[in-house]
Image (cartoon, rainbow, N blue to C red):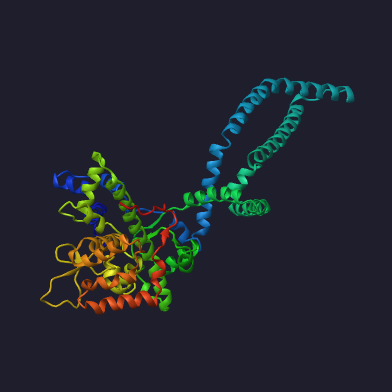
């Protein structure tokens, strides 16, 4: 993305790429929208905003020099939160008691002072049988009373400190390491109980279901903004969130971590295997997220297609999807063929081929990872382009926009009709959508034709990309394919 683009221009660019017709209509009617209004409409259409700052950025610098300052910030925030919420009643009680004590102290102090004064004078006069000067006695008594007040004040401060910081809740807030230890101890205590429950299969199912729900609620999306992240920081983030491709291949689950751009120094990684794994870790969640969005639309499409009568909201949704998938004749069958997923193995292999595993100039400067051409839009001119040609490589504000455009290209362009027909055939036969079964239909994607598809198929095989075909996001909801 160009650095001189304003925030509003970036939002308008996103609206064009994601084809948000609501914004397009406002612009067509010459109605100016503020940046806040644009962000609201984009978020409503589930379009990621590039300037969104996520909490996971703190986790990136956990091992850096800034960790002590972050911990101090957490300590101060937690203290005031506790003092504001937990100790308000205690403070009110203390102030009420202090008010009563002050009134009693003021009322009785003078009487107590003069009584001590006179009593001391009388005792001394009776003991030694002579008059003692009242000024000297006043100094002695005042010193004694002041000392007593200081002792009482210090004792009161200690009591108040113990009053506030003796609760277990406060220790949990300030010392987070103790929380981890306490949670481990609690789990250790619960383990023998779970072992007894395992013997009864009915109770075992009851215990597992709420645990799975809690895990889904904890998972959140991480959108990494345009911060020119370095590869070292990215790898540190992967370690912090325990992002391991081996586990993804086995469990078929990937965390929703969305990078807006590639690290600028990705090419400096000497290990080819590490470079490839880093590239796959960045691209995989983006492709899976777009596929799940398509599956949600497809699920809604199947529900509406079963109905004999549709309401205005459903009709409006269908009209929007017909425009999005460029179905000009209004055919619902054609819409069903186009509204389907792209095999993840093909998407990753093509992205790797077209972007040089995320190190090409087009990928680093314009977030273009699929090498899509343009003659009208904003793009980057290839250095080896002949004078006769005028095409450019299409530029995108964020990586996910490039994946979105790639998906739209395969699902709408006439050059990939065979791809869509073969995919629809697999659907009708209830077969799995696999890249190895569809790659031969994409010979029109590059000028080299069949040779290009052979290269992509070889990349899929060498890097075992078919292992990612059925991968889902950890926070996704499983929806079965409905038959019409």
| Residue 368 is at least partly visible in this image | yes
| Residue 281 relative to residue 210: left or right | left
- Residue 218: percent from left, percent from top: 48, 51
- Residue 255: percent from left, percent from top: 44, 59
| Residue 50 is at least partly visible in this image | no
Q: Quadrant of residue 435?
A: bottom left
| Residue 268 relative to residue 74: left or right | left
> Which residue is more in the foreground, 44 or 180?
44
Number of numbered markers: 0
- Seen from this angle, which residue lies furthest front? 429
Q: Quadrant of residue 117?
A: top right
> Which residue is more in the foreground, 95 or 24?
24
Q: Quadrant of residue 393?
A: bottom left
Residue at 53 percent of width and 54 percent of height: 71
- Residue 24: percent from left, percent from top: 18, 49
- Residue 173: percent from left, percent from top: 58, 47
Residue at 59 percent of width and 51 percent of height: 204
The quarter of the image holding the N terminus is bottom left
> Which residue is more in the foreground, 45 or 200?
200
């Amino acid at each position: 993305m160009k650095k001189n683009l304003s925030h509003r221009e970036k939002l308008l660019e996103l609206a064009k790429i994601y084809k948000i017709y609501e914004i397009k209509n406002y612009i067509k009617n010459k109605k100016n929208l503020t940046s806040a209004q644009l962000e609201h409409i984009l978020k409503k259409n589930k379009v990621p905003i590039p300037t969104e700052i996520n909490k996971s950025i703190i986790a990136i610098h956990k091992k850096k020099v800034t960790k002590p300052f972050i911990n101090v910030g957490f300590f101060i925030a937690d203290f005031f939160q506790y003092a504001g919420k937990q100790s308000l009643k205690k403070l009110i009680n203390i102030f009420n008691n202090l008010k009563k004590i002050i009134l009693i102290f003021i009322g009785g102090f003078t009487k107590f002072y003069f009584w001590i004064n006179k009593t001391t004078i009388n005792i001394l006069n009776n003991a030694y049988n002579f008059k003692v000067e009242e000024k000297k006695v006043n100094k002695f008594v005042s010193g004694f009373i002041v000392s007593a007040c200081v002792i009482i004040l210090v004792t009161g401060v200690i009591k108040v400190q113990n009053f506030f910081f003796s609760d277990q809740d406060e220790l949990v807030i300030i010392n987070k390491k103790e929380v981890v230890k306490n949670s481990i101890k609690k789990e250790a205590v619960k383990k023998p109980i779970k072992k007894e429950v395992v013997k009864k299969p009915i109770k075992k199912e009851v215990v597992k279901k709420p645990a799975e729900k809690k895990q889904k609620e904890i998972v959140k999306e991480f959108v990494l903004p345009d911060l020119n992240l370095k590869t070292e920081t990215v790898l540190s983030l992967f370690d912090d969130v325990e992002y391991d491709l081996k586990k993804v291949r086995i469990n078929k689950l990937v965390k929703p971590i969305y990078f807006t751009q590639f690290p600028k120094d990705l090419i400096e990684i000497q290990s080819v295997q590490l470079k490839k794994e880093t590239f796959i870790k960045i691209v995989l969640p983006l492709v899976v997220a777009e596929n799940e969005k398509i599956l949600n639309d497809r699920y809604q499409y199947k529900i509406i297609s079963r109905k004999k009568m549709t309401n205005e909201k459903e009709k409006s949704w269908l009209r929007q999807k017909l425009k999005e998938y460029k179905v000009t004749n209004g055919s619902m069958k054609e819409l069903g063929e186009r509204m389907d997923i792209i095999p993840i193995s093909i998407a990753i292999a093509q992205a790797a081929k077209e972007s040089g595993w995320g190190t090409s100039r087009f990928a680093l400067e314009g977030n273009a990872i699929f090498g899509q051409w343009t003659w009208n839009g904003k793009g980057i001119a290839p250095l080896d382009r002949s004078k006769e040609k005028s095409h450019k490589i299409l530029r995108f504000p964020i990586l996910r926009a490039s994946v979105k455009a790639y998906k739209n290209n395969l699902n709408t362009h006439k050059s990939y009709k065979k791809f869509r027909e073969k995919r629809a055939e697999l659907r009708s036969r209830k077969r799995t959508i696999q890249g190895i079964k569809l790659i031969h239909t994409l010979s029109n994607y590059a000028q080299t034709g069949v040779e290009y598809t052979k290269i992509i198929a070889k990349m899929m095989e060498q890097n075992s990309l078919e292992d990612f075909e059925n991968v889902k996001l950890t926070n996704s909801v499983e929806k079965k394919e409905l038959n019409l």
